[in-house]
Each structure stands twice: as structure tokens, then as C-alpha cells.
Amino acid sequence: MVWRNSPSGVVTMGAALREPELFASIGAYESPMPWLPDDGRADSVPAPPTTDDPDEMVESFFRRLASDSTWEGLNDAARADRLADGPALMAELGSLRSTEPFDVTQLSMPVLFGVGGERSQQHHRAAHEWLLEHVPGSEGMVVDAAGHGIHLTHPDAFALFVRRAVERRSPDSGA
């Protein structure tokens, strides 16, 4: 079982499609999939970054998806860690906009898709609904008070999400 939020969930699902025998289950929380064919979804996907400065992009992205107060609450080391991810984050988000990397509807293992409630972006809620409708055997979990940064703001709820994804593992997976 592998889980992760945001772009890492996309990587996990792609890997699971390529090597399904390695995955007993998947938990993916608000993984960005702007290629999903959902009416109205394209208009709700955030625009590409308007800056070439990775530090500016990371701060803007973090504030938008977690919150201003969460960004401001980061200590210097945590903020430096986020900023160090800037070039990679810019590349990941750019690549997600360029093509449909795989057909998520072909996932063969149990999948738990998670999303926050009213604090989550509309495109994450729309993707969540689409995934539950189109990925056979998938299950959804909504954490009403959480947003994209659930692991920072609601760690107990995120731990519950991870435990639920593990519980969904295939009985014949041996994992």
C-alpha cells in the first residue's frame, strides 16, 4: 500500500498501473489530475504559475492550498524545506498539464480517494467525484474541516485516512 497527497499520488497511481503486483492498495488524497474529463472541470483547474521564481511559486501555492496561517506558522527550517522543493514542484505541475499520463480507470487494486470539505479547491472536489464514479471498486473519504494540507492541519484525520487505505488492501496481495 502506498499513499500520498498531491502530485505524489499521481506518481503512485501511474506506478501501480505499470506494476500492479507491487500494490496491495492505494490511498490518494487530493491528487491533481487536470486531464480528467469532467464537465466544467477544466475551468476550475488553477492556472499555471505566473512567475518563474520557484520561491514565489512555492509560497503562493502553499498559501492557496494549505492556508496563509499555515505558511506563516512554519518555522524557518520547514519553510526552507518547502522552498527547496520549488523547482521540482514547478516541473511536476507543468508536466501534469501537458498530457494524460495514464488511464486511472484501469487501476485494479483497492483505491481510497480522499478530499477535504469546503476548504478544498473546487477542482479537487470535482476530481474526487469523477474518480469515485469511474474507478471500479474505489471508495471515497471526505474530511469536512480539512483542505489540501490535511497532514498539517488535521493529522489525526489523515492518519485515519491512511489506516482505512491499508484496511482496503487486497486479501490475496500477501501484503
Image (cartoon, grey):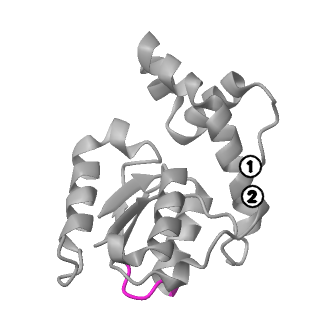
Q: CA distance from mark 2 to mark 1?
A: 5 Å
Asked whether disc 2 touches disc 1, contact meaning CB atoms under 8 Å apart, the reply is yes
Q: Quick check: 28 left or right of 42?
A: left
Is 135 covered by the magenta stretch? yes
Amino acid type, label 2 = Arg
Amino acid type, label 1 = Gly
Counting the numbered discs, the total is 2
From the image, tell me which residue sits under label 2.
97
Q: What residue is drawn where x is 57% and y is 30%? A: 85
**Does any portion of residue 104 appear in the rendered image?**
yes
- The numbered disc on residue 94 is 1
Name the quadrant of the C terminus.
Answer: bottom left
Name the quadrant of the N terminus.
Answer: bottom left
Q: What residue is drawn where x is 51% and y is 17%? A: 80
Q: Residues within 10 Å of mark 1 (few under 14, many from 20)?
A: few
Q: What residue is drawn where x is 51% and y is 33%? A: 67
